[in-house]
Image (cartoon, grey):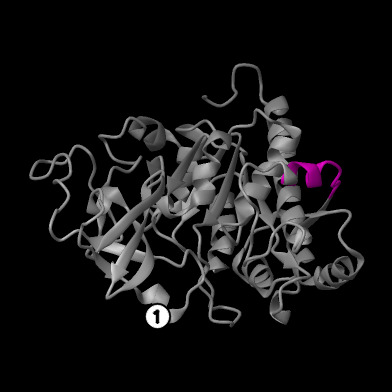
């Protein structure tokens, strides 16, 4: 039973629920289950608690059995609101309108689009890189238009991310792709999501990363971030400029994530089949910098290693409107990780400025 409605952010409500006298922290998505109120009975999924999972730590509300949500608009009709089904064939599948559909106001632009026109795209393994990448972008160009393309390797609902809610003023929009949903725009694939970032949202730079919650089994190929390499391929196929945010650390207790994480070595070294830019900031702590340099040979065969000045990036990171945290470690505990993500943002926005300067007058992208 719901005993307290605690706080809410876009698309989500945090609750306290009592189960046989034990209090649980729970999360409900009103668009799926309706608005919970104190006294409501709730059907909960508590697998995260049983498994001791770290991300979020919530029981998830499956239903309010005594007060079901209203039917979605268009139910029983031709559903002009959309035909794209996400979280398909699960009890909580969501029907959304994709940017690709004829009923979308962006359909004509997406149907006519076949290229990103050189737009820089930062690809990142973890959701926690997003605010750091944005800090690097806006440190040099505060007015840059940035779109976030959220893939489905982690959380499927964009509503789960409090970080994303706190970054709304820094983004022109979020596009949820694949099985992910809940963004400002919906797209079927990463490719059409990238086209929407460019042609529907008028982005100068896009960031591609999974939602919160990386799934990994400790093996080189068994982690959801492997999709970063596929994102690089998608950017190249569409005529964009891929900028890889390397995952590095000198604080992770697991040796496979020390220096350049094996996630980045696999995604960029094996999965990405085309060259991209891999920025590294100056000013990394000496032991970390030495280990990273020793690993670069695995990546420099195909990719361009870009040295990026870090002046001003620390200040930009500390001014982030949301707390910086990766695997429970904040900015000072894992400074190299966040600094590298910010360097990727700085390099990407530099490419965007260069691209705009090279465009003939009157041919800048639609805004």
Residue at far right of view: 286
Residue 230 is left or right of residue 177, and the answer is: right
Quarter occupied by the N terminus: bottom left
Q: Considering only vertical position in the picture, is 289 above or below 208?
A: below
> Residue 258: x, y in percent?
75, 74
Q: Residue drawn at (71%, 73%), measured in percent from left and top?
A: 252
| Residue 36 on the magenta segment | no
- Name the residue carrying label 1: 50
Residue 305: image quadrant is bottom right
Instruction: Check the image and report above or below for 186 versus 41.
Output: above
Magenta span? 308-317
Indicate the position of residue 116 as horizontal and vertical percent values: 55, 39
Can residue 278 be seen here? The reply is no
- Membership of 312 in magenta stretch: yes
* Residue 295 appears left or right of 231: right
- For the residue pair 222 and 120, the one nearer the viewer reads as 222
Report whether residue 274 is seen.
Answer: yes
| Residue at x 41% of width, y 65% of height | 58
Q: Is residue 66 left or right of residue 277?
A: left
Give the residue at x 43% y 80%.
51
Farthest residue to the left: give it: 76
């Amino acid at each position: 039973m719901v005993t307290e409605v605690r706080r809410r952010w876009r698309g989500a409500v945090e609750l306290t629920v009592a189960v046989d006298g034990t209090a649980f922290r729970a999360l409900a998505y009103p668009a799926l289950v309706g608005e919970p109120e104190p006294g409501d009975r709730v059907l909960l999924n508590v697998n995260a608690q049983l498994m001791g999972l770290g991300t979020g730590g919530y029981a998830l509300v499956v239903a309010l059995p005594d007060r079901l949500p209203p039917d979605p608009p268009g139910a029983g009709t031709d559903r002009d609101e959309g035909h794209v089904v996400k979280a398909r064939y699960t009890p909580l599948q969501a029907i959304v309108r994709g940017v690709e559909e004829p009923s979308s106001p962006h359909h004509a632009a997406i149907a006519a689009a076949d290229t990103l026109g050189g737009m820089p795209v930062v690809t990142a393994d973890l959701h926690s890189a997003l605010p750091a990448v944005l800090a690097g972008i806006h440190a040099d160009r505060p007015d840059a238009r940035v779109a976030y393309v959220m893939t489905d390797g982690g959380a499927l609902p964009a509503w789960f991310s409090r970080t994303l809610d706190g970054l709304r003023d820094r983004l022109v929009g979020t596009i949820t792709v694949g099985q992910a949903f809940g963004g400002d725009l919906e797209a079927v694939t990463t490719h059409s999501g990238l086209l929407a970032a460019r042609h529907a949202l008028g982005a100068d730079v896009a960031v591609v990363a999974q939602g919160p919650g990386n799934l990994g089994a400790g093996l080189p190929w068994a982690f959801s971030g492997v999709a970063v390499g596929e994102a690089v391929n998608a950017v190249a196929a569409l005529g964009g400029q891929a900028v890889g945010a390397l995952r590095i650390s000198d604080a992770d207790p697991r040796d496979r994530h020390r220096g350049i994480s094996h996630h980045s070595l696999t995604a960029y070294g094996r999965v990405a089949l085309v060259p991209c830019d891999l920025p590294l900031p100056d000013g990394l702590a000496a032991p970390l910098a030495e280990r990273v340099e020793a690993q670069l040979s695995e990546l420099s065969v195909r990719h361009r290693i870009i040295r990026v000045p870090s002046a001003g990036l620390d200040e930009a990171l500390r001014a982030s409107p949301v707390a910086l945290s990766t695997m429970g470690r904040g900015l000072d505990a894992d400074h190299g990780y966040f600094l590298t993500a910010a360097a990727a943002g700085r390099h990407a926005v530099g490419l965007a400025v260069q691209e705009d300067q090279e465009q003939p007058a009157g041919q800048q992208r639609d805004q």
